[in-house]
Amino acid sequence: MSSKTKAPQNHIKLVESICKYISSQPSPPPLAELSDQYNLSHFHLQRIFKRVLGVTPKQYAEQQRHERLKKELKSNKSVTNALYQSGYGSSAALYTKAVSKLGMTPNNYKTGAQDLIIYYSISNSPLGKLLVASTNKGICMVSLSDEEQLLIDALNQEFPKAIISKDNKYLYEQVKIILQYIKGQEPHCELPLDVRGTAFQKRVWNELKKIDYGTTCSYEQIAKRIGKPKAIRAVANACANNPTSLVVPCHRVVRKDGSLGGYRWNLKRKKALIKMEKDNNLNP
């Protein structure tokens, strides 16, 4: 619970109690049940809850269920048992919701992407070594580093049980487009993606792709654009966890005062990318 919230103390205590009640239930309780439990109207309860936490009781309950699912899957339980223990039940609709949260099927999440086939290519670029990796659905990782082995290690760590092999021919066109972008010869990296992430992360990444070439946007602005004005830190974390550098242009997000903020692939690269885009935007 944020210490910076301006909500009255009695509202904060009420929401803390509601959170405990939600967490104690085997599945997300409906709003009507919460209203009866706390003798409040649906509207009043939801308004207070959202004012304090920034999310609705339903969204909070879904987040809690999602976290339980991840914990159950990592404890080596069967997928079916994990779904039941997390309160998802067995219906196709709820299973689909679990998949959308994980970014892959629960079974693949549990097994570390076991048997998923991933091809990768490593090239020299003006920004150092460039790794591009892809499944048969789309690019799953784009990374930058000074050392090739660090890129390979990071790929294997992200997909510990996938079948990973190097194939420059398979990724020739994708690598070509990304290299042209880095060199200022191509303003867009419109390539199909196959990324893992939470629903929130994917919303942020989709919004980053809307930032115009040659411009920057603050973390605060992104938070407002996705309808979560208080989630500035969460937006920054989503940017930091973006697995597909350049294709999802997280380098275009800076602090409110214009300073660079962080960058997963080194601030010098972020500075160079912003400068390259601005220079090319001024001189098309």
Image (cartoon, rainbow, N blue to C red):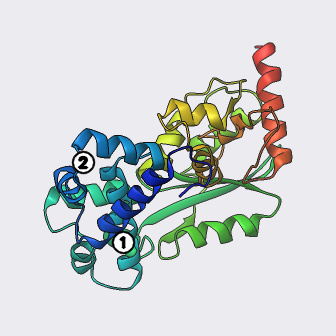
Q: Which residue is mark 2?
A: 40
Q: Is residue 189 visible?
A: no
The answer to whether 8 appears left or right of 238 in the picture is left
Q: Residue furthest top?
A: 283
Q: Say what secondary structure mark 1 lies in.
A: helix
Between disc 2 and disc 1, the foreground one is: 2
In the rendering, at what x and y percent does residue 29 appear? 21, 60
Q: Is residue 53 visible?
A: yes
Residue at (52%, 30%) from the top-left corner?
A: 225
Tally of numbered discs = 2
Quarter of the image that includes the C terminus: top right
Relative depth, front residue between 129 and 231 = 231
- Please name the amino acid that badge 1 sits on: Arg
Relative depth, front residue between 182 and 33 = 33
Q: Which residue is mark 1?
A: 68
- Please name the amino acid that badge 2 sits on: Leu
